């Protein structure tokens, strides 16, 4: 199981990292709205490896059979590895290339709120929230944990649940009977 989880987790992490690094430099040109769509599309794409990792384990190690619990364990471990790659890449990118990311995003969000007719009190509250978030993200460990858990992990959890349900396969009744008869002989 370790080999399967590592291989598919590392590939998933490499995909999410590569796509993140490909999109982030162009965020000013793309815009935050399209950036979110591209970012979450990249996350979903990278988590397709969860499905393939569970299927590979089922076919190559499990003899075509896997329980929901085993499938879920494999999928969630692949997800955790991929999320770690994502969080570490974001932290490195944030500090090295985009230290003003939160200021730019806060300006975007406030502009959107103003366009939608939000009250000055709502805008002030949101501005304070962004200042608080910015200070939290400046702590590398907290920032990595928040980014890793809040952005890719929910998607990975959903893909893991769906993949585990789709790929679970119990031994057929005839296989159970044959194995019981062999044990008696």
Image (cartoon, grey):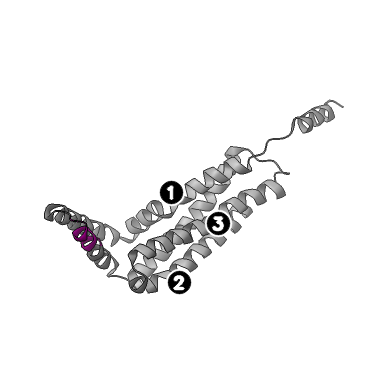
Q: Nearer the viewer, mark 1 or mark 3?
A: 1
| Residue 154: assigned label | 1
Residue that badge 2 annotates: 22
Query: Can residue 175 be found in the magenta stretch?
Result: no
Q: Is residue 80 above or below residue 72?
A: below
Q: Is residue 155 above or below residue 170?
A: below
Tell me the CA gap for discs 1 and 2: 22 Å
Number of marks present in the image shown: 3
Q: Nearer the viewer, mark 2 or mark 3?
A: 2
Provide the secondary structure element on which disc 2 rests: helix
Foreground residue among 115 and 132 = 115
Give me the residue at 56% from left, 52% from top: 50
Residue 80 is left or right of residue 107, and the answer is right
Q: Earlier in the sequence, mark 1 or mark 2?
A: 2
Foreground residue among 45 and 50 = 45
Residue 180 is left or right of residue 162, and the answer is right
Q: Residue 58: where, in percent of width, then height? A: 67, 46
Provide the secondary structure element on which disc 1 rests: helix
Q: Residue 135: where, in percent of width, then height? A: 24, 60
| Residue 11: assigned label | none
Q: Residue 131: where, in percent of width, then height? A: 20, 59
Residue 132 is left or right of residue 121, and the answer is right
Dot 1 and dot 2 residues touching (CB under 8 Å): no
Q: Earlier in the sequence, mark 1 or mark 3?
A: 3
Instruction: Please give the range of residues in magenta.
Output: 109-117
Check the picture and name the quadrant holding the C terminus: top right
On the image, which quarter does residue 3 sit in? bottom right
Residue that badge 3 annotates: 9
Q: Residue 176: where, in percent of width, then height? A: 76, 30
Give me the residue at 16% from left, 52% from top: 122
Q: Earlier in the sequence, mark 2 or mark 3?
A: 3
């Amino acid at each position: 199981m370790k080999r399967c989880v590592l291989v598919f987790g590392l590939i998933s992490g490499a995909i999410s990292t590569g796509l993140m690094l490909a999109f982030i430099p162009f965020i000013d040109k793309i815009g935050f709205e399209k950036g979110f769509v591209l970012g979450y599309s990249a996350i979903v794409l990278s988590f397709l490896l969860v499905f393939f990792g569970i299927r590979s384990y089922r076919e190559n190690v499990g003899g075509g059979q896997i329980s929901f619990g085993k499938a879920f364990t494999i999928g969630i471990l692949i997800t955790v590895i991929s999320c770690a790659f994502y969080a570490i890449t974001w932290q490195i990118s944030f500090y090295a290339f985009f230290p003003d990311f939160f200021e730019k995003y806060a300006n975007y969000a406030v502009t959107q709120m103003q366009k939608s007719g939000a009250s000055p009190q709502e805008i002030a509250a949101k501005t304070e929230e962004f200042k608080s978030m910015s200070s939290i993200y400046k702590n590398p460990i907290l920032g990595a944990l928040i980014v890793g858990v809040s952005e890719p992990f929910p998607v990975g959890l959903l893909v893991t649940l769906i993949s585990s349900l789709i790929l679970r396969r119990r031994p057929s009744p005839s296989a159970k009977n044959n194995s019981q008869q062999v044990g008696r002989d």
